[in-house]
């Protein structure tokens, strides 16, 4: 199982970090040791003082495929969940300055909290799904899939030209605007529509 993540897939998020809006999907990966399941607490890492939350919808791949055509790509996922791409922003900034990869800032243990998954059939329109993240009862992020720069099908088709997708792979599809820092003691709650998907603490 692998975790593939899409960067800068909502225009307003790209703007808030002063990043250019991409013309093709921006791809990075996290190891399976980044997964944090069952609403277990997230332990703030000692190597960073500026960890940020990024709430994202996550696709679960349901069958193997490569060189997938965009028109058939919807057949390759059947469930959707909510995840957080925790990012050590201080490490990321240092690496960007030197032109180095982001992995240490994105791929550390526990950096990918993940919810349970909902069947795609539960949603009438995959491009009108609301999702949100609240911290200590205050809504910090609110997104809707109508604002995706690259559709789920475009992402699957693009990734599969380079990397074979296998059953159980997860694709984090990008975060909307409103990202920011977390602190020890914070209570994070994430929602897809009215379904609470995430509910955990930072320790």
Image (cartoon, grey):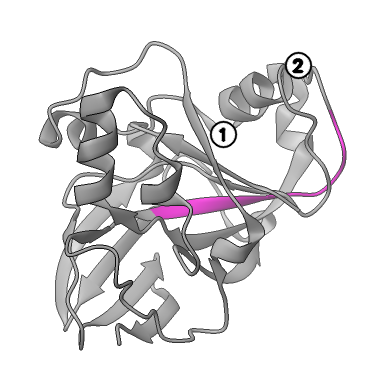
Q: Secondary structure at mark 2?
A: loop
Which residue is painted at 82% across and 24% down in the image?
A: 66
Question: Quick one: label 1 or label 2, which is nearer the N terminus?
Answer: 2
Q: Which quarter of the picture shows residue 16?
A: top left
Q: Which residues are magenta?
A: 56-65
Magenta stretch holds residue 64: yes
Most common secondary structure along the magenta stretch: strand
Residue that numbered label 2 is attached to: 69
The answer, for residue 130, to whether it is visible in the render is yes
> Which image quadrant is residue 8 in?
top left
Where 134 sits versus 16, above or below?
below
Which sits in the foreground, 122 or 139?
A: 139
Q: Is residue 62 left or right of residue 112?
A: right
Q: Residue at x 36, y 49 (%)?
A: 105
- On the rendered image, what quadrant is the C terminus found in? bottom left
User: On the picture, is 186 further left or further right than 16?
Assistant: right
Q: Residue under label 1, please give it.
A: 152
Residue 101 point in image, percent of width and height? 42, 32
Residue 138: say if magenta.
no
Cα–Cα span, label 1 and label 2 = 12 Å
Residue 11 appears anywhere in the view: no
- Identify the residue at the far top of this view: 23
């Amino acid at each position: 199982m692998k975790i593939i993540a899409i960067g800068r897939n909502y225009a307003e998020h790209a703007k808030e970090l002063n990043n250019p809006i991409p013309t093709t999907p921006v791809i990075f990966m996290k190891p399976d040791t980044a997964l944090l399941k069952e609403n277990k607490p997230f332990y703030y890492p000692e190597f960073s003082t500026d960890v940020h939350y990024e709430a994202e919808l996550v696709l679960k791949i349901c069958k193997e495929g490569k060189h997938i055509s965009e028109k058939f790509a919807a057949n390759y996922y059947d469930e959707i969940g909510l995840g957080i791409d925790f990012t050590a922003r201080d490490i990321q900034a240092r690496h960007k300055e030197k032109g180095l990869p982001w992995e240490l800032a994105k791929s550390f243990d526990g950096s990918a909290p993940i919810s349970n998954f909902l069947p795609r059939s539960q949603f009438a329109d995959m491009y009108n799904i609301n999702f949100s993240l609240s911290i200590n009862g205050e809504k910090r992020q609110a997104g809707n899939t109508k604002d995706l720069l690259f559709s789920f099908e475009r992402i699957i088709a693009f990734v599969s030209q380079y990397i074979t997708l296998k059953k159980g792979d997860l694709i984090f599809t990008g975060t909307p605007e409103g990202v920011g820092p977390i602190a020890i003691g914070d209570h994070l709650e994430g929602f897809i529509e009215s379904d609470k998907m995430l509910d955990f603490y930072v320790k």
